[in-house]
Amino acid sequence: MPASRVQLEVPHALRDLYCPACAAPVFTEADGPTEHTCDHVRFFIDREGELSLPDPESLAGEDQRRQQALVDLVEATESWDEFLTRAAKVLPASVLILEIVETGGDDEGTQSVVAFELAPPR
């Protein structure tokens, strides 16, 4: 079963985003995107379209293989939408791909995307 892909529309701007599994920051209004995200984040695309994702070598087993598949998809896809569609098929059902669309205000129409692994291996 593939990962779940969910679009969340936020009026105005989302100031802060924290991991739903461990409460570690992904981005904050004060500091922007976190340089080193928690182990639950499989990738993060910020408002400017910059991608950050863990190095596959930092993971083990099946998680390492999936993370390498994400790295390969970045190079093989033409658009973020194509990347997200294909990434959802690569990632397991325990992953939530959250597409955050900010409406209104200065950031009208901006989008950021984060993929959370909600049940990482121990």
Image (tube, helix red, strand yellow):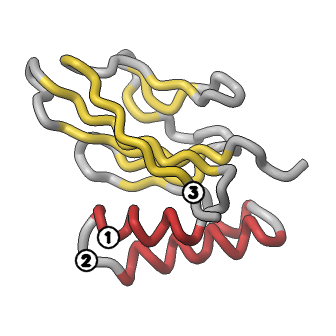
Q: Report, in whole angstroms, how far the alpha carbon at label 3 lies from the one at label 1.
A: 15 Å
Could you tell me the amino acid type at mark 2?
A: Glu
111 or 88: nearer the viewer: 88
Crowd class of label 2 (few under 14; some 14 to 19; many from 20; radius 10 Å): few
Residue 21 percent location from the top left of the image? 69, 30
What residue would you read off at disc 1? 82
Look at label 3 and name its amino acid. Ala
What residue is disc 3 on? 3
Circles 2 and 1: CB atoms closer than 8 Å: yes
Look at 78% across and 71% down and name the residue there: 62
- Would you say 74 lies left or right of 87 here? left
Q: Quadrant of the N terminus?
A: bottom right
Counting from the top left corner in percent of width and height, residue 121 is at 85, 52
In-front residue for pair 117/28: 117
Per the image, the residue denoted by label 2 is 78
- Residue extending farthest right: 122
Q: What is the secondary structure assignment of the residue under circle 1?
A: helix
In the rendered image, the vertical position of residue 24 relative to residue 42, given as above or below: above
x%, y% of residue 32?
37, 28
